[in-house]
Image: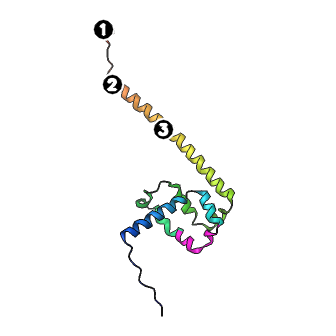
């Protein structure tokens, strides 16, 4: 009779390596072209891979999400839980559409953020000018 050996506890180094690998992989999910690549190679038909995507949902927790540079990867990870989305990714046009939508979102975000920063800078300057006492020049006194 063959029995499974008990699971071995990961060393700190192994945990760190697994964390880095999973972090990098989850962030790759933000790239629609990579998702298209995975779909075309049949990864989204493999139940083990689908289970792995489900396991990776722990990245949505704030204590892990704070390490992500590309937060849109969490949205993609969520969408990958749905079979219909995984099937649509085989189509290159689907990946292109997602890519275009991300680009439009970033452009809108940048414009809006720039406008908000400009507005804040102007408010700050106005309030600074209002607080400074007016200096009287020597010429205006005479």
In terms of sequence position, does the residue under pointer 2 or pointer 3 come before the other?
Answer: 3
Image position of 104 with respect to 127: above or below: below
Badge 1: how crowded within 10 Å, few (<14), some, or many (20+)? Answer: few
- As measured in the structure, the alpha-carbon distance from the residue carrying label 2 to the one carrying label 3 is 24 Å
Residue pictured at 37% horizontal, 25% vertical = 129
How far across and how far down the image is residue 138, in percent?
A: 30, 10
Q: Which mark is residue 79?
A: none
Residue in the image at 58% along x and 74% along y: 47
| Between discs 1 and 3, the one toward the N terminus | 3
> Image check: 66 left or right of 99?
left
Q: Which numbered dot is residue 132? A: 2
Does dot 3 land on a helix, a strand or a loop? helix
**Farthest residue toward the top?**
142
Question: Magenta region: which residues?
Answer: 41-52
Q: Any mark on residue 141, and which? A: 1
- Residue pointed to by mark 3: 116
Question: Would you identify the image quadrant in which residue 10 lies?
Answer: bottom left
Residue in the picture at 48% in, 91% down: 2
Q: Position of residue 42 (x, y in %)?
A: 64, 69
- When the figure is inspected, residue 96 is found, relative to residue 19, above or below; the finding is above
Mark 2 falls on what kind of element? Answer: loop
């Amino acid at each position: 009779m063959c029995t499974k050996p008990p699971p071995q506890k990961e060393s700190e180094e192994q945990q760190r390596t697994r964390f880095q690998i999973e972090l990098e992989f989850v962030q790759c999910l933000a790239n629609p072209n990579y998702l298209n690549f995975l779909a075309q190679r049949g990864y989204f038909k493999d139940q083990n891979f689908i289970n792995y995507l489900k396991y990776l949902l722990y990245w949505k927790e704030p204590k892990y999400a704070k390490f992500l540079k590309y937060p849109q990867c969490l949205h993609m990870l969520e969408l990958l839980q749905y079979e219909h989305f995984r099937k649509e990714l085989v189509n290159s046009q689907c990946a292109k559409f997602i890519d275009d939508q991300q680009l439009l979102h970033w452009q809108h975000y940048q414009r809006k953020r720039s406008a908000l920063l400009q507005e804040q800078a102007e408010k700050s300057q106005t309030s600074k000018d209002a607080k400074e006492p007016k200096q009287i020049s020597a010429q205006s006194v005479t």
